């Protein structure tokens, strides 16, 4: 049986964290996979969400330790809940 602290730690590591700096840069931590990456769209899978980043001149500068840094002119972000298969 997990203690409350262990449950919080597990929840923290399974959650995605998104940091936005102006409209130039987004850091997504705890991502699982990059589905698509071109100059207009970056699609990323996290534990529970699919994250779409729309803009122009988009590119990835870092993909390490389950985090990714997206740079370019960001116009919108869409976060969709992933369906769990039964």
Image (tube, rainbow, N blue to C red):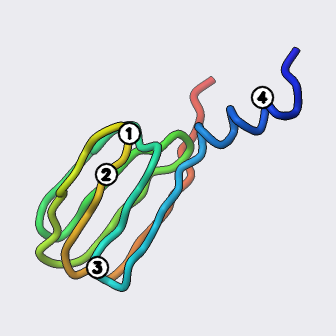
Crowd class of label 3 (few under 14; some 14 to 19; many from 20; radius 10 Å) = many
**What's the residue at 38%, 78% (across, down)?**
21
How far, Cα to Cα, is label 4 from label 1?
21 Å
Q: Earlier in the sequence, mark 4 or mark 2?
A: 4
Label annotation for residue 66: 1
Residue named by callout 2: 68
Tag nearer the camera, 3 or 2: 2
Label annotation for residue 74: 3
Q: Earlier in the sequence, mark 4 or mark 3?
A: 4
Q: Position of residue 63 (x, y in %)?
A: 25, 45
**What's the residue at 28%, 44% (across, down)?**
34
Q: CB atoms at circles 2 and 1 under 8 Å apart?
A: no
Q: CB atoms at circles 1 and 3 under 8 Å apart?
A: no
Residue named by callout 4: 6
Crowd class of label 1 (few under 14; some 14 to 19; many from 20; radius 10 Å) = some
How far, Cα to Cα, is label 2 from label 1?
7 Å
- Location of the N terminus (image quadrant): top right
Tag nearer the camera, 4 or 3: 4
Q: Earlier in the sequence, mark 3 or mark 2?
A: 2
Indicate the secondary structure of the residue bearing disc 4: helix
Indicate the secondary structure of the residue bearing disc 1: loop
- For residue 13, side relative to residue 46 (left or right): right
Residue 59 or residue 48, whichever sits in front: 59
Q: Earlier in the sequence, mark 1 or mark 3?
A: 1
Residue 9 or residue 77, whichever sits in front: 9
Q: Position of residue 45 (x, y in %)?
A: 40, 45
Q: Position of residue 71 (x, y in %)?
A: 22, 69
């Amino acid at each position: 049986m997990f203690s409350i602290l262990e449950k919080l730690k597990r929840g923290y590591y399974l959650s995605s964290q998104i940091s936005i700096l102006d409209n130039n840069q987004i850091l997504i931590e705890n991502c699982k996979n990059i589905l698509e990456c071109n100059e207009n769209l970056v699609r990323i899978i996290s534990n529970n969400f699919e994250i779409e980043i729309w803009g122009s001149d988009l590119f990835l500068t870092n993909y390490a330790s389950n985090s990714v840094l997206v740079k370019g002119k960001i116009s919108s972000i869409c976060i969709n809940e992933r369906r769990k298969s039964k």
